[in-house]
Amino acid sequence: MSADTIDFETASPSEIRRFLRPAPAQRSVARRSIDGAELGQVELDPETFGIEPNQAVLHQVVTAQLAAARSGTQSTKTRADVRGGGIKPFNQKGTGRARAGSSRSPVWIGGGVALGPKPRSYVQKTPKKMKALALRSALSDRAAIGKVALVDQWSFEAPSTKAAVAALRALELEGRVLVVLSEDDFVADRSFGNLPEVQTLLVNELNAYDILVNDWVVFTDETLPGSPKVVSASEIDVVEDEDGNVVEIVETEVDVVTDGKGHVTEIIETEIDEIIGEDGEVEAVVETQVDVTLDDEGEVTSVTETVVVELADEESADEESEGNKS
């Protein structure tokens, strides 16, 4: 049986539902700067922004999230918790009244509460895949109605509410706005902090409920789900001789590129080696770059190495020749 056909008589209900599910839609969004200038179009990940929203999963996940937010500290006193009532209020017989053993019975005024609420946890266990589906459903719902915005970066020089208001006006964002930030966007977080109609979230805190209660969802190049990400790390090594003189400085930087699904697609290692002479001047600079590309299964497909050597003597000779010409 191919992927394009299915036998409805032998297929399970889940296989039939998957077969009848529409293919993810390809959507795009305009990439802009904070002053409103358009920088081009960006294709959104179809698996994240183009699926048909699952209403049932959205309802269950949002309900569980709201339930988990409850403190669960409510408490009532039962007949055992209310002070008093330790003595029988009147004789068992001869009064004509209904028998009673305590004045703190729930049927008495001032008595305890029957079956009242007690402190408890309202947390509901929700599978991770269900949370992920709800998040993709919420993002697809906002993308379908054109309520997803993309900026290159929040380039605020200092925290400024006035600059944040100007940016929202330039981007033509009205109503409740959810701004998704990275950990380095603390200036933008402070800038939007005084605006009651704007909610800020870190990208790892993004959830279905906050998307649905806001009209707009604004991402940056770094926080856009499904877009390639680059993780960098650098290290500097200083080599000294026996006399403590610096003879070499080696700077190594490694960039790991991942796709929208988190798979590593490329590893770039750049090493810059500065060779120091006895006079303390740089004699040569050797730059080595190794580019390793990988396929979807994590197998190495190609390795490219580039070496560039720059000598200080050549640069000084060029400067002297330019001086003689002038």
Image (cartoon, rainbow, N blue to C red):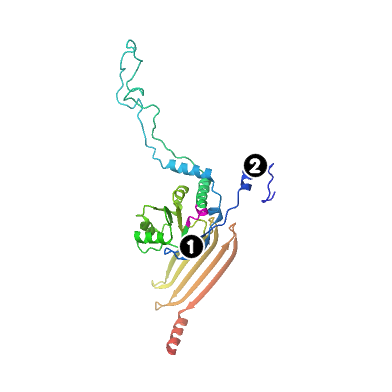
| Corner quadrant of residue 180 | bottom left
Do we see residue 160 in this rendering? no
Q: Which residues are magenta?
A: 142-148
| Corner quadrant of residue 192 | bottom left
Secondary structure of the residue carrying tag 1 is strand
| Residue 138 among those drawn in magenta | no
Secondary structure of the residue carrying tag 2 is loop
Q: Amino acid at mark 2?
A: Ser
Q: Nearer the viewer, residue 289 or 123?
A: 123
Q: In percent of the image, x 51 and y 53: which residue is there? A: 145
Q: Nearer the viewer, residue 145 or 8?
A: 145
Q: Which residue is mark 2?
A: 12
**Distance from the alpha carbon under mark 2 to that under mark 1:** 43 Å
Q: Report x, y in % for residue 98.
A: 36, 15
| CB contact under 8 Å: marks 2 and 1 | no
Q: In percent of the image, x 45 and y 79: which residue is there? A: 312
Count the marks. 2
| Residue 147 among those drawn in magenta | yes
